[in-house]
Amino acid sequence: MREIVLDTETTGFDPESGDRIVEIGAVELFNHVATGETYHQYINPERDMPEDAFKVHGLSEEFLSDKPKFAEIGQAFLDFIGDAKLVIHNASFDMKFLNAELRWMGLPQLPFDQAIDTLMIARKKFPGSPASLDALCRRFGIDNSSRTLHGALLDSEILAEVYLELTGGRQPDFALSVANTESKTGVEDNWRPKPRNSPLPARITASEIAAHDAFVEKLGEAALWKRS
């Protein structure tokens, strides 16, 4: 199972009002384990950078001026994500921007059901509690001390840890997968513990066995399990 944990940074809140994506960061998971494969791209938004947006991510118009435009990287981005599920915190925001940029390029739109929204998962799992990325890091004891500003790749790496905690840890299915294949981590997906060389010693004492036998004798014909 391939999943892409993804985050974007933008110039604002609404692509239909002229806001654009300025950074994309993504981390690949395979069977809920990070593979080490990432995607990271700064993007020239072809417009000015509002002060409020700059305070969030620290990406200036000058810094982005020599970076590629989305039209130059859009296809490579689609090639990286493929048909993998996209794990996003507040997915409606990022999907709205990604699909706007893809639409302007004439490229296929990303179906919304391709996204897994960790914000929705957190709100259902912890109703009434703060569900921001920082709040979830505090809840799960995840170190986010390096997150002084929002950054798409760093936030994706942090979100990957949060996502694994939300879904039950690094191996929520205990790696007992149906398929008999080897994952990118080199561990068989249908791993099972090896048989013991000798059985475990009995945990029932002789006195407990005697007491049980005496109890069964008192049941007489009711003890159906004694019949052959």
Image (cartoon, rainbow, N blue to C red):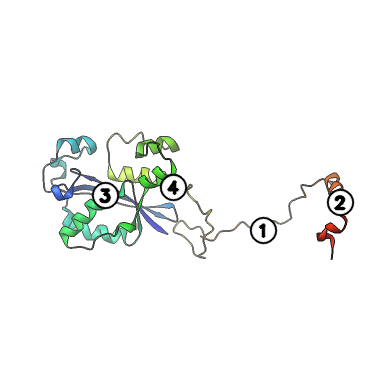
For mark 4, give the secondary structure. helix
- Identify the residue position indicated by label 2 in the image: 213
For mark 3, give the secondary structure. helix
- Identify the residue position indicated by label 3 in the image: 94
What residue is rendered at 76% in x and 47% in y?
A: 203
Q: Is residue 79 above or below residue 132?
A: below
The amino acid sitting under disc 3 is Asp
- Identify the residue position indicated by label 1 in the image: 195
Question: Which is in the foreground here, disc 1 or disc 4?
Answer: 4
Choose the circle earlier in sequence order: 3 or 2.
3
What residue is rendered at 30% in x and 57% in y?
A: 112
For this view, does 163 lie left or right of residue 193? left
Question: Which is in the foreground here, disc 1 or disc 2?
Answer: 2
Image coords of residue 115 (percent x, y): 33, 55
Farthest-out residue, left: 47
Quarter of the image for the C terminus: give it.
bottom right
The amino acid sitting under disc 4 is Leu
The numbered mark at residue 164 is 4
Distance from the alpha carbon under mark 3 to that under mark 2 = 67 Å
Choose the circle earlier in sequence order: 1 or 2.
1
Image coords of residue 32 (percent x, y): 44, 53
Question: Which is in the foreground here, disc 3 or disc 2?
Answer: 2
